[in-house]
Image (cartoon, rainbow, N blue to C red):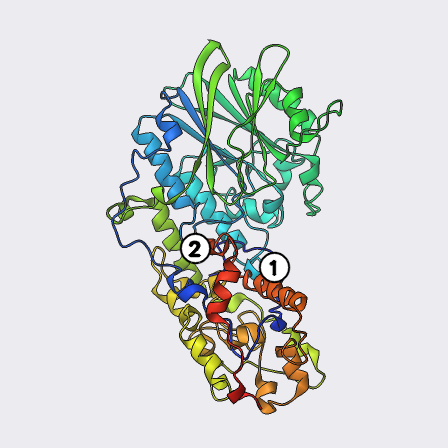
Amino acid sequence: MASNWLTVLSAGTRWFAPAIVIGMTVIAAFGGGTLAKWMRQPTHAIAVPTGVLPAELERWDRPDLTLLITGQQHGYLLPCGCSRPQVGGLERRYNFFQALSSRGWKTLPVDLGDISQMAGPVNLSNMQGLMKYRYSMQALKMLGYAAVGLGEYEGALPFFKALGEYALNEPSPRVVVANLNDADTQYPEQTARWQAANVEGSPWKVGITSVIGPSVGSKIKDPQVRLGSSRQALESVKTEMDNSKIEYRVLLYQGVFTRGAEGVPPVEAEAVARAFPEYQVVVALSEEDEPAGAPVRIRHSDGRETLVVRIGHKGKYVGVLGLYKGAAPGMPAHKYAIAQMSEDYLTPDNALAGNPVVKLMEAYSAELKRDGYLARYPQMVHPFQAAVPDASPTYVGSEKCKKCHASAFAVWKGSGHSHAWQTLADAKRPSNREHDPECIVCHTVGFGYKGGFIDAEKTATLKDVGCESCHGPSSEHLKNTSDETWLKLMNPWKVGMDNSPAAVASKQQKIDQFCQRCHDIDNDVTWTHKGFERKWPKIAHPTPESEKK
C-alpha cells in the first residue's frame, strides 16, 4: 500500500507516467513480493510492552512530572505494514504511555497540532482527511492529552470543519489557540485561549497555550480565519495564567525555530521564547521528519531557562521531558529524550482486547466500508483519455495482455503485484483495508480514473496492480497493436530508444521516481541504499525477440 496506513504519501504526481516502464506489463513486485507481505503481522509473540522503555529513560530517576510531546502527525495513524521495521502510530504510542504509567510516572501529553493530512495519497483528494482527524482526536483523548494546537494542516480541512468534526461536541483534549480572532463567535466553545492541567501528585500547576505564527498564518487561506498578534495574545494569556497561579507553562508554537546569524534579531519561535521567559518549554515546528535528540536551551538574564523542542513528523517519535523539583518554585530541573515508536511497542496478541486504539482503528476501517468510501471518489480523466482526439481508451485488465506479452505476463504473475488486492482483503488489525481508498489506490488498476477500479464486484478484472497501472488504459493499443501513437504513449523509450549510458541512467532514475509513488520511504523501508538498483533487475520484463513483430 502506498500510504503509511491511513495517511499521506509522498507528494508525487498521480499521473502514472507510462514512459517509465519497458515492455507491456506492470512493474512486478520488488524483491519477491514486498507488497504481498505488506500487512502481515508478526507470527511470534511479542514481549508485552508494559515496562519496556528506551535505555536512556531506564537510567532516569522517576520525574516528578513528565511532559509527553507530539505534533505534526500529518495523518499518519498507523504504519501500513508494507515492509519492516516501520515506526510510528497511535497504537504504539498508547503502549508507550502505558509503559510509563506502569512505572508510576505522572504524565501530561500535549500535541503541537498538524494532526491531519493535507492531501490524500498519490494526489487523491483529501476525502478521508476530516474523518481521520476525528479518529486521531478520539485516540488522543484515550491517551489522556490535555491540549492540542491548530496549524496549517487543520487549516486545509478547514478550521470550521475540523473543529465541528470533534471539538464542537467534545472538550477533551481541549483545542487551544490564543491568537484566533473572533473565536467566540466563529467557533463558539470549540477552542480555548489556554488550558490548565493539574496532574494528581505533581508539584506544579501547568498551563498550556498555543499561537499560530506569521509564517504558518500566511499559509492558511481560509477567509474565516483571522489571526491576531502572537505577542499581544501571549501578553494577555500571561496575565490570565498569573492570576490563576500557573507555575509551569507550555507554549505550542505553530512556527519554525531558526537561529539566525550572530547579530541578527531572532524571529518566530526563538523571538517568542526570548520575549516570554515565563514559558519553560516551547514546542516549535520541525522542518525535517527526524527530530533533534536534544532541545535548544535559551538562557534568560534572570537565570531562567526555556527549552525549545521539535519532535519531527508523522508520529514517529514522542518527546519525553522529565521535570524534577528545582531549587526555586517554577524552575524545575529538566531531562529530555526522544522515544521512537518502534516495534518494541507493538501490541502483543494477548493484549489486543485491552488496547482501545486497536479497537478504534477497526472502527475507522469499518466506517469506510459501511459508508462506501470507494464510491465517493470522483473519476478524473486519464492523460491518455485526453491525449488523442476522438479516442477514449479504457482499461481492459491484465489478462488481455497475456496473448501478445506472455513472458512479461509470467513475470507479473509471479510477483506480489499480481495479488496486491488480496493482501488488503486478508489484512487484520484492522481489517476491511480493501474498502479503504487510500490503500486501494496502490493495490488496483486505475482507481480514481475514468473506467478504473471501482470495487471488487464491479471491476474484478482491475483488482491488483496490473499492466495498466503503469502503462495506462490500453483498449486503443489492443485494437491496433502496431499503432505508433499508442506504442509511444505506453512505451516512449522502447521505440527509437537512445541506449547511451546517460540515457539509460536517466530512464532508470525516472522509473525509480515513479515506483516511489507507492514504494515511498515510509512504506517500503527496503527502498533505501540503492533499493531500485537492487530490485529492478529481478523484475525487468523486456519483450523477447520471439514476441516482437
For the C terminus, the quadrant is bottom right
The label shown at residue 480 is none
Q: Which residue is mark 2?
A: 80
Residue 401 at x, y = what percent?
Answer: 50, 84
Residue 26 at x, y = what percent?
Answer: 51, 74
> Which residue extends farthest front?
501
Residue at 55% x, 21% y: name it. Answer: 280
Residue at 68% x, 42% y: name it. Answer: 225
Q: Which residue is mark 1?
A: 12
Q: Is residue 370 visible?
A: no
Q: Is residue 406 visible?
A: yes
Q: Quadrant of residue 421?
A: bottom left
In the depicted view, which residue is nearer to us: 453 or 141? Answer: 453
Decide: is 170 above or below 32.
above
Q: Quadrant of residue 121?
A: bottom right
- Dot 1 alpha-carbon crowd within 10 angstroms: few under 14, some 14 to 19, many 20 or more: some
Dot 1 lies on which element? loop
In the depicted view, which residue is nearer to us: 39 or 241? Answer: 39
Decide: is 315 above or below 120.
above
Dot 2 lies on which element? loop
Residue 502 placement, left or right of 427 = right
> Which residue extends farthest top?
327
**Type of residue at label 2?**
Cys
**Type of residue at label 1?**
Gly
Residue 22 at x, y = what percent?
Answer: 57, 75
- Dot 2 alpha-carbon crowd within 10 angstroms: few under 14, some 14 to 19, many 20 or more: many
